[in-house]
Image (cartoon, rainbow, N blue to C red):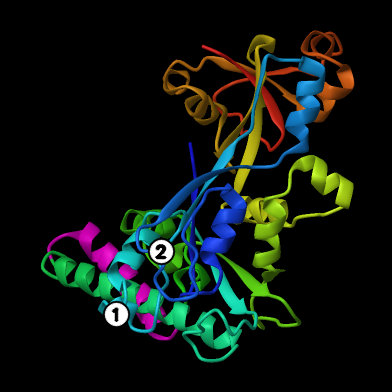
């Protein structure tokens, strides 16, 4: 199960620079708008010290971290929802992502064209917010006009019509769907539409000076520096005491998606990290490891990673009574090491 983060923002704000630093992939980076036309897609390992510590005691043949996918999407401009620039193509690409990483320009560089004409993080963020809202409004208007034909004779359609109308009214007032007070049932009801403002957003200020983005939680990074750091080897980073903040960014993306990590040790052959949505149960975790495991799930043996490391190995953890047997109703916790019985 892989989750994807769409890197979005106005042209020339540092999206492709960030993508290159994260994925170590060569990409076109230019000082002019729309260098990225087709989205760049890269898979990034999620840093996790727990996996390394489990591997130290299990001594497997193979260690496999969990991953997250980053998609570098073409720059958005004002009126993208009307098709300006690469507008509709851009918005369709966001629709397929699980979350949005919004990069906002807060750096001065005369060599890199600034489509806004000024350094104004709030204004930039507002343009992106407006474009996402307008696209969702357009989608909802289409859905409501379809439902309007049926909702008088169909109770289910009537209920959905009322929900979509409530959301549309909130969007018209400038509220993102993620800011509307919806029940879990209502969120599930609209999930199929992949509405853009329902997706969690992480804001990243690309700055080489002092700047902030009031009103929203955000990270600050100098993406040009991060790109340069990414070209150093691990040994060179240690020698020159260079630290990157990319790991923090990857984990922040992981957290906004409400994800947890569980581990498997595959009889000592492979120690592996897996991604799961918070709140899911043992058979769901089994299904992530292998499709059959969900259907054929009988029970699982579970131990917290730290207890396993302290015990020294699986056998000693069993002898100490640290391993518990769980059934289909067990809710998986972050850091669980699981052995499935099917």
Q: Where is residue 61, by image quadrant? A: top right
Question: Which of these two is toward me, 328 or 108?
Answer: 108
Q: Position of residue 252 (x, y in %)?
A: 66, 56
Magenta stretch contains residue 169: yes
Q: Give left or right: position of 126 versus 108.
A: left
The magenta segment: 153-174
Q: What residue did someone put label 1 on? A: 84
Point out which mark residue 104 bears. Answer: none
Magenta stretch contains residue 15: no
Residue shown at 42% from the left, 62% from the top: 73
Q: What residue did someone put label 2 on? A: 36
Q: On screen, 252 above or below 320?
A: below
Q: Secondary structure at mark 2?
A: loop
Residue shown at 27% from the left, 70% from the top: 139
Q: Where is residue 151, by image quadrant? A: bottom left
Question: Which of these two is toward me, 241 or 116?
Answer: 241
Instruction: Note whether residue 7 is visible.
Output: yes
Q: Give left or right: position of 101 versus 303.
A: left
Q: Main secondary structure of the magenta part?
A: helix
Q: Position of residue 177 (x, y in %)?
A: 45, 70
Q: Are marks 1 and 2 in contact (CB under 8 Å)?
A: no
Residue furthest bottom in the image: 118
Q: Secondary structure at mark 1?
A: loop
């Amino acid at each position: 199960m892989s989750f994807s983060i769409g890197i979005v923002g106005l042209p020339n704000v540092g999206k492709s620079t960030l993508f290159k630093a994260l994925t170590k992939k060569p990409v076109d980076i230019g000082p002019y708008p729309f260098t990225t036309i087709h989205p760049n897609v890269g898979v990034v390992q999620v840093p996790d010290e727990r996996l390394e510590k489990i591997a130290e005691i299990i001594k497997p043949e193979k260690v496999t971290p969990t991953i997250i996918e980053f998609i570098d999407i073409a720059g958005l401009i004002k009126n993208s929802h009307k098709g300006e620039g690469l507008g509709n193509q851009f918005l369709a690409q966001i629709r397929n992502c699980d979350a949005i990483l919004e990069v906002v320009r807060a750096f001065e560089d005369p060599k890199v064209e600034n489509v806004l004409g000024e350094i104004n993080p709030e204004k930039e963020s507002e343009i992106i917010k407006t474009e996402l809202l307008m696209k969702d409004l357009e989608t909802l208007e289409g859905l409501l006009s379809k439902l309007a034909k049926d909702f008088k004779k169909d109770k289910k359609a009537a209920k959905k019509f009322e929900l979509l109308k409530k959301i549309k009214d909130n969007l018209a007032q400038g509220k993102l769907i993620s800011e509307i007070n919806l029940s879990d049932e209502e969120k599930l009801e609209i999930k199929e539409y992949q509405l853009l403002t329902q997706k969690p957003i992480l804001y990243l200020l690309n700055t080489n000076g002092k700047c902030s983005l009031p009103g929203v939680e955000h990270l600050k990074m100098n993406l040009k520096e991060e790109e340069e750091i990414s070209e150093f080897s691990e040994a060179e980073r240690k020698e020159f005491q260079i630290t990157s903040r990319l790991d923090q960014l990857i984990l922040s993306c992981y957290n906004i998606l409400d994800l947890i990590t569980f581990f498997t040790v595959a009889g000592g052959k492979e120690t592996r990290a897996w991604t799961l949505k918070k709140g899911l149960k043992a058979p769901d975790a089994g299904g992530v490891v292998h499709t059959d495991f969900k259907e054929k799930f009988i029970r699982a043996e579970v131990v917290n990673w730290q207890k396993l490391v302290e015990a020294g190995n699986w056998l000693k953890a069993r002898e100490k009574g640290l391993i518990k047997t769980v059934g289909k109703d067990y809710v998986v916790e972050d850091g669980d090491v699981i052995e499935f019985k099917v």
